[in-house]
Amino acid sequence: MMHRLAARTVLNPIAVLAFSTLFGLAALAPDSLFAQEDVAPAATQGTLLITLKLAKQPDHPATIPYTIALPQSCSSCQIVTDITYLAQNPREIDFAVRVPTSTALPMSVRTDPSAVRRVLLEGTDLDFTRTADGIQFNLPAQTTDRINSAEFHTHIVYPGLDVRFEHADPERKAGYYANIPFPTLQRQAAANIEFAQREAVFMLGLNTYVADQQIGNILLMGFDTNDPHGHTDAPPHMHMHMRWPQRGGTQIGHFYINDHGLLTENRVGVQGWNNGHIKPFLPGESFTTYDLRAKGVYTHTITKEGWLNLGRPGGSECHIRPAVAGRGFDQDALVECPGFAQRRVSVRDNIATGTLTVTIEDTQGQRSEVYHYDTDTGLLLSGN
């Protein structure tokens, strides 16, 4: 899933009947047009949920004691105890507080002061000072919830398309992935499929189509392994979906990846509808993503081999398959689209240096795109 919403998401009522018919969903009562998103811890009126990250020095233990101190003068300030918002690993400490809206506040954390390298609010560095028993910093006044400080991914944005790349760090693994073997193969497969789909989107002109028609924004994503703020992104899968405009919701395809690096099924959920889950689409069964006018935009089909087809309804179709015969998508991906030379897609991510390299090879030769990102937050620093 993309960033979680703090409020409710509403589907355009004009599309209700059309979508009920298209997807075989039961008729929806008016209240069913609303779907409650992730619920934050109980709030005091007039407060905001603020998440923060303390980036650790690399030579400190995975777990160190810490205590958050809020101003005694702030009667509405709260330390969030919901474990959804609490995490600690060799890289970082993540926590959350509730504070009054539009109010700057001094804060302190009692801990080993030498352990803290950065204080981060959703990717923004906050100045801090070390004291004898911890650190002190000022939290700037906020006007909206800040719930994404624990996330670790990079956005590469084009007109009509947002490629969100999740960085797989075994040191940060949490939630579903905390106590199982790290899904290195599946994460590599998701990375190659994600950028292979990007190439197919470009060759089909899908991103320019949705931008020109102003019908939303296509999102490509893999899966989180660090359970950021309780986002259980499991079992391993990748996504391609189109977020409808004006917070109208979205159909979210989840393409599940087995331990051979091949696709098994597409489980689609409609964000914005209660009980809006659609039955899984198995190999050979096509699923079409629609706009809010119930017009088909693109269609996905997982093949019996575990490969992927992506095309325009009634138009061109691209075929995406592993680059090595008899292997999975962890061994690079081949993209074949009508009118274009075959492209081989290879993705390599170095979390130590914060370098994401995407290599595209076709009959014209090979080109590499290099993206540099913040190794604490995933924020894109530069790229081509």
Image (spheres, grey):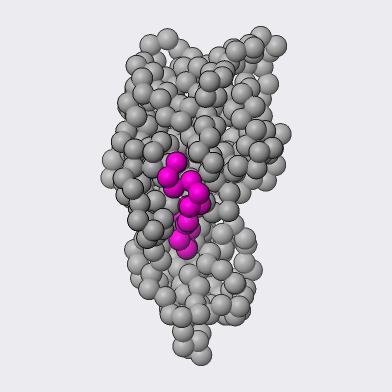
Residue located farthest toward the bottom when viewing the structure as drawn = 73
Q: Which quadrant would the C terminus be assigned to in this image?
A: top right
Residue displayed at 53% across by 35% down: 295
Horizontal arrangement in the rendering, residue 116 relative to residue 174 (left or right): right
- Extent of the magenta region: 1-18
Query: Closest to the observer: 108 or 15?
Result: 15
Image quadrant where residue 29 sits: bottom left
Q: Would residue 96 be counted in the magenta stretch? A: no
Residue displayed at 41% across by 55% down: 33
Residue 133 makes an appearance in the image: no
Query: Closest to the observer: 374 or 117?
Result: 374
Q: Position of residue 338 (x, y in %)?
A: 60, 13
Q: Would residue 11 be counted in the magenta stretch? A: yes
Q: Position of residue 184 (x, y in %)?
A: 40, 32
Horizontal arrangement in the rendering, residue 119 relative to residue 181 (left or right): right
Q: Above or below — where is 197 with respect to 144?
A: above
Residue displayed at 59% across by 35% down: 356
Residue displayed at 56% across by 19% down: 315
Image quadrant where residue 316 sits: top right
Residue 176 makes an appearance in the image: yes
Horizontal arrangement in the rendering, residue 62 relative to residue 364 (left or right): left
Q: Position of residue 382 (x, y in %)?
A: 70, 42
Q: Above or below — where is 243 with respect to 113?
A: above
Horizontal arrangement in the rendering, residue 222 relative to residue 375 (left or right): left
Q: Position of residue 255 (x, y in %)?
A: 40, 32
